[in-house]
Amino acid sequence: MADREAQIDAEDQVVIQLSHQIRALPGVTGCTLASPGDDPRQPIGLPPVVVAQCGDTTVVIERPGTLPGMQAVRRRIHAVREHHAGAAHVWFLRRDLGQFGQLPSHTVRLSGRDIEHQRVAPTEQQLAILDAGGHVYWLDGKLVLVPYGYHSFRHPARPEQDWTAWPKWPPHKDPRDDWRISKPRPAPTADCWGLVPIPLSSLTRTRVAFHPADAHKIMDELYAAQEGRYRWRDRRAREVYAERHAPPPPQPAPIPATEASATEAQTEPAPAPEHPQPTGQRDAETPPQGTVIPSPTSSANLAQAFPPPPASPPTIPPPPQHLPSAPPARRQRRWTDAFRMLRRRRER
């Protein structure tokens, strides 16, 4: 009994310290302690709550050491609804092995950087708070961890896609294995919860309300990143399929042996002519410069081009008999004299 009373005093002291932190936040106009629904005959087993006023918004903040059973959690939820209607009910859980760190962390990519986010498997009490409209956060000093839903799935294999053994992909991972996010509150069907760390002071920084705006902004970035990741993997699966099913390149036709030898003969360079080296002395058989030496090859060609002369001269036939004979010389002179006289008369 004494141990239980000491534990209750310690938990009350934690809530008192939290009230000082909440009161110091910008935008908080009032901060009190209360124990809604507490019955001395049947205590709920939870420390008092911090009731903070942020403008027109009322926030009821829980800071339990450990979550009690489902019956106590439901009684506190109903009591807050009765005494503080319309208030936001926020539960700040302690970062301990019983309520945190059951799952390994996972890597997320934000603004071109890889960041590790913690993951937690929600308990039955935490799911009941979420189902009742409450908010479950983890508080570690001045750091708040806001959950989002983590849903693992496998990409379907569509026609003309290849997801097997991608090049440059880790061999122990399947490119079809992926995950998606549910936000700003985890969906009831989430496999686990991922946690976004934000400063406690940021809960009332952007507006006069108790609102994790910075965490929701990071969740929006995670959603945009997952959409780009989906499109990239889908496109990559199609590219791998196209690479592995591409037709082989056409092979050149074989060259026949005769054409190959002719091509080699054309490409083979001709041997360079051999030039005799000057010795300074004229060869005895070399004729003097300017002497024309008949080529035997040229004489043979001329002999073949012209036929040999005939053995006897050809016979010339006599002129034909029907051709008229030439006029006598007297008739020619008569016509010439008449032509001259006619020409003289015209000149006169």
Image: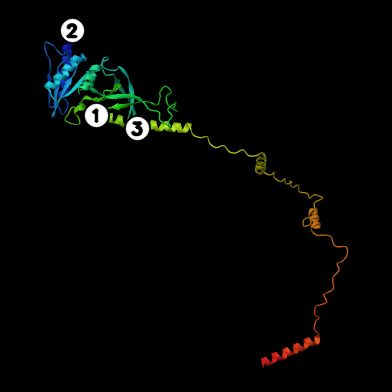
- Element type where label 1 sits in the image: helix
Residue at 14% from the left image edge and 19% from the top image edge: 79
Q: Whole-percent x and y of residue 112?
A: 34, 31
In the rendered image, the vertical position of residue 286 relative to residue 85, given as above or below: below
Answer whether residue 293 is visible to the viewer in this image: no
Is 12 in front, or is 60?
Answer: 60
Q: Whole-percent x and y of residue 208?
A: 16, 30
| Residue linked to disc 3 | 228
Query: What is the three-letter code of the residue carrying label 1?
Result: Asp
| Quadrant of the frame with the N terminus | top left
Give the quadrant of residue 146: top left
Q: How much space separates mark 1 and mark 3, taking CA atoms? A: 22 Å
> Can you tell which of label 3 and label 2 is closer to the viewer?
3
- Element type where label 2 sits in the image: helix
Residue at 22% from the left image edge and 22% from the top image edge: 131
Q: How much space separates mark 1 and mark 2, taking CA atoms? A: 40 Å
Q: Is residue 151 left or right of residue 326?
A: left
Q: How much space separates mark 3 and mark 2, taking CA atoms? A: 54 Å
State if disc 2 and disc 3 touch (CB < 8 Å): no
Q: For mark 3, does the 10 Å Cα neighbourhood hold few (<14), some (14 to 19), or many (20 or more) residues?
A: few
| Residue linked to disc 2 | 3
Q: Whole-percent x and y of residue 179?
A: 34, 26
